[in-house]
């Protein structure tokens, strides 16, 4: 059982999204305003569809906080779906008298077929409502709570777009994160960002979609989160599982990622620097090609996660497919959708990385209260220097 864990509930066109978070220590200052910025970031980005014009996501804290501080009890959050008013009959909880048109035209690349077969449905809407990326709004809200906890210890989170539609950014050594947030596609390379926008514009008239790659960077993480002793305690393994659980994500790398496969080991591995070059911080490395994780544990360098986002499968010009009822060839089902979700996907990836790190943090330093957690962390920092040997 994880130290920081959560559940979400809700459908894309249902009444709303519910989140329950467990494991946050008592005494953490927390307000709805701490969650709002990330929800707004998720709704932005060039290439989004009409749904983002309807929803103005706001997470309401329903329990677990009193007078501005957490109680150590489960935290419940609620995000209303404003589009629910247009779906009250199609998504009604109680049976309805009128005949509701079923969705039977399957979409390639979506959860439609395996979900319908697995659960015995004759209406694909029973699958697509939960499989929708609308659920990622709930994850971003939970991730914002995780970030709020980790901010108490100086840990920071950022993300940016590496590529869209085959256009790749030339990432500067120092990233201006304010400029990234202002860029339409959240690119650190303004020129490449303009070309990414052009790639999105080129796909839209064709009724097509484009994917890309995002990068998440986490600063301030101390050495020693995660563990080498079991497969399910390795920090990179936990992050990879979390990233691949997000809609449309198909690959994960750390640091150099796949680029490192074409290089010799002498150029890939991060040399450990002697004390004289630590720059005031314990145990530094000459490079960070492994993305801040070795042997399943954080190294003290920035954690760098790269992830691939496929083009979303709901196309305005649908692909050939098959009808669930007849098995005959048809055009795939289409509902309102985005052309590109890559800029928003970086925000979702950020949230999932924050959730994993919060869990690993509480696993190592956790206490029932924030002061107790802080004391555990402060004590640990006194133990991380070189191991003095006495004969």
Image (spheres, rainbow, N blue to C red):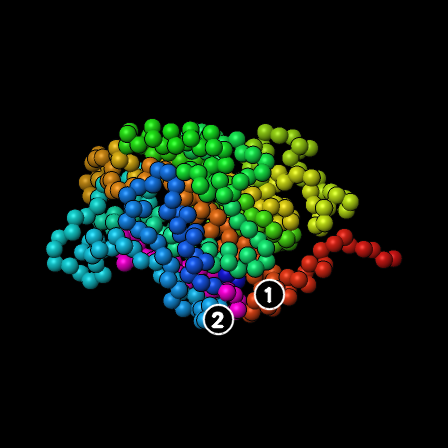
Identify which residue, 123 or 253, lies in the foreground.
Answer: 253
Please report the residue visible at 23 percent of the width from the left and 61 percent of the height from the top: 93
Q: Which residue position is annotated with label 1?
A: 373
The circle on residue 71 is 2
Q: Is residue 303 visible?
A: yes
Whether the magenta-drawn stretch holds residue 110 is answered as no
Q: Secondary structure at mark 2?
A: loop
Structural distance between the alpha carbons of marks 2 and 1? 14 Å
The answer to whether residue 359 is visible is no
* On screen, residue 327 above or below 99: above
The residue positioned 87% from the left and 57% from the top of the image is 391
Which quarter of the picture shows residue 198?
top left
**Residue drawn at (24%, 40%) of the image:** 333
Residue drawn at x 39%, y 41% is: 45
Mark toward the start of the polypeptide (2 vs 1): 2
In magenta segment, residue 25: yes
Packing grade of label 1 (10 A; few <14, some 14-19, many >=20) is some
């Amino acid at each position: 059982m994880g130290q920081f864990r959560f559940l979400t509930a809700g459908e894309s066109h249902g009444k709303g999204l519910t989140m329950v978070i467990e494991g946050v220590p008592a005494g953490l200052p927390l307000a709805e305003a701490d969650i709002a910025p990330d929800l707004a970031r998720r709704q932005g980005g060039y290439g989004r569809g009409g749904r983002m014009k309807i929803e103005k996501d706001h997470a309401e804290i329903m329990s677990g906080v009193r007078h501005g501080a957490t109680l150590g009890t489960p935290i419940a959050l609620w995000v209303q779906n404003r589009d629910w008013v247009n779906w009250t009959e199609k998504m009604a909880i109680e049976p309805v008298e009128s005949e509701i048109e079923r969705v039977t035209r399957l979409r390639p690349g979506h959860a439609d077929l395996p979900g319908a077969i697995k659960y015995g449905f004759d209406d694909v809407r029973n699958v697509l409502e939960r499989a929708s990326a609308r659920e990622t709004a709930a994850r971003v809200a939970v991730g914002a709570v995780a970030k709020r906890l980790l901010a108490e210890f100086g840990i920071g989170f950022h993300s940016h777009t590496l590529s869209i539609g085959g256009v790749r950014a030339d990432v500067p050594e120092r990233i201006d994160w304010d400029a990234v947030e202002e860029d339409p596609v959240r690119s650190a390379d303004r020129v490449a960002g303009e070309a990414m926008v052009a790639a999105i514009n080129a796909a839209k008239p064709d009724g097509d979609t484009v994917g890309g790659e995002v990068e998440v960077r986490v600063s301030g993480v101390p050495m020693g989160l995660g563990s080498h002793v079991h497969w399910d305690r390795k920090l990179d393994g936990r992050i990879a599982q979390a990233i691949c659980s997000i809609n449309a994500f198909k690959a994960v790398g750390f640091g150099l990622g796949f680029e490192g496969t074409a290089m010799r080991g002498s150029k890939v591995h991060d040399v450990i620097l002697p004390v004289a070059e630590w720059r005031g911080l314990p145990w530094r490395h000459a490079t960070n090609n492994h993305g801040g994780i070795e042997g399943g544990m954080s190294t003290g360098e920035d954690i760098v996660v790269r992830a691939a986002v496929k083009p979303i499968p709901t196309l305005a010009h649908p692909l050939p497919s098959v009808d669930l009822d007849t098995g005959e060839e048809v055009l795939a089902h289409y509902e309102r959708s985005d052309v590109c979700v890559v800029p928003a996907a970086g925000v979702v990836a950020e949230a999932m990385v924050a959730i994993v790190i919060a869990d690993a943090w509480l696993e190592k330093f956790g206490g029932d209260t924030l002061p107790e957690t802080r004391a555990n962390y402060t004590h640990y920092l006194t133990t991380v220097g070189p191991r003095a040997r006495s004969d």
